[in-house]
Amino acid sequence: MKLTVGLGSVDEYIRFSEAGADEFFCGYVPYSWTQKYDTMMPLNRREVLCSNVQLGAFSELEILSSMIRDYQRPVHLTFNSLFYLPEQYPEIAKIMKACMCLGFQSYIIADPALILYLREHNIDCEIHLSGETAEVNSGMVDFFQQMKLKRVIFHRKNTIEDMKSVITHVRMQNVGDTEGKRDVRSSQSSLEFEAFALNELCQFTGAFCNSLHCDEMGYLCRVPYLLTCIKNGQQRNDYITCGKATSDRDDIPGKETPSIEIPAEDDTGYLPGASGCGLCALYRLKEAGITHLKLVGRGNYTDFMEKDIRNLRRALDIIKASKTEKDYINSMKKILFPYGCSGNCYYRQHYIEAKNKI
């Protein structure tokens, strides 16, 4: 599995590449767009103007393009607002064409109408279906794959079972349909799948978020909550917890959350996955067919982001050295979380199952 890392500044590219990132994603919002639409009609889901969050000048793209030629770590540009105005599509296409002239060939997109516009106007770029689209099943992926996707990015609330089901469905199509029930699209043979691995749990899950990712509204991203599933009309007893750092706890609805001290960070205040962590699930994600792991955190403290990359890379090395999932989790916990983890699990149900095995 490759590491796809959020990039907030050109200055971070070399440092993160040397730390172990395989590729990057970042936003680019030219001043002409901001001048015309401000931040209330954003080009991507980072509705801010501050530095170290996204690029704002074409000259920065030119510098980044030069770095990519030297380090061979591709950068995917985010155009992943949930929707745009019809008159904005030609403007976006013009921006993308300018980026493509510099060598930026892949784009993370959430708006189906924008994807359709690009394909209808023969703009031959690679499209990564954003997690902001909230794709939830194989039917949705089949629909979008008609637009020749390169990658599907699963959203934050997809379970590992959801992802495995979609990936298995796509791979089975590649084997061929002996009964003639479905046309097999050759592009699906190279379809990639990306899952969230570290940082920034979100209770709204992108497509269902009506807030803004700005300083004034940022607190909404960290409101504590419990999430569970309802199957056949019955509420399950497993819960995803978000918003409070705790040490290996299982929250029980209806009972007061026990007061547990935040796990010991290092001497700089760093704890892997403090705001969201999927490290326990990496072994299972690999088995499910995930090809890329998403490390979010554009605008986060650069030193912490570098540590995130190194720790995620270390976790992948532990997977290679482990014969079983149990071996992996035991080794990973000892090395990366000697004093306990944050408890903010991306894949809470899997974590509970793995914990019971151990």
Image (tube, rainbow, N blue to C red):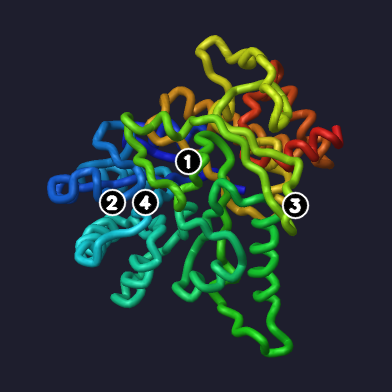
Q: Amino acid at mark 2?
A: Leu
Could you tell me if residue 2 is visible in this image?
Answer: no
Q: Residue at x 70, y 76 (%)?
A: 175
What amino acid does circle 1 point to? Val
Marks 1/3 in contact by CB < 8 Å: the verdict is no
Disc 3 target residue: 234
Q: Are marks 3 and 4 in contact (CB under 8 Å)?
A: no
The reply to whether residue 300 is visible in this rendering is yes
Mark 2, Cα crowd under 10 Å, few <14 / some 14-19 / many 20+, is many
- Mark 1 secondary-structure assignment: strand
In front of the other: label 2 or label 1?
A: 2
Quick one: label 1, few (<14), some, or many (20+) residues within 10 Å? Answer: many
Which of pointers 1 and 3 lies earlier in the amino acid sequence?
Answer: 1
Give the quadrant of residue 325: top right
Q: Which mark is in front, 3 or 4?
A: 3
Q: Is residue 195 above or below residue 139?
A: above
Examine the rendered structure and indicate whether residue 154 appears above or below residue 329.
Answer: below
Disc 2 element: loop
Numbered disc 3: secondary structure: strand
Give the Cα separation between the discs numbered 4 and 2.
8 Å
Q: Which residue is mark 4?
A: 78
Helix, strand or loop for disc 4: strand
Label 1 sits on residue = 5
- First in sequence, mark 4 or 2: give its number: 2
Residue at numbered disc 2: 43
Q: At x 84% / y 35%, what residue is drawn?
A: 356
Q: What is the x, y in percent for residue 63?
A: 26, 42
Which residue shows up at 77% across the image and 29% down it?
A: 331
Q: Position of residue 287 (x, y in %)?
A: 73, 52
Q: Residue most toward the top?
A: 267
242 and 163: which is toward the camera:
242
* Distance from Cα at disc 3 to Cα at disc 4: 38 Å
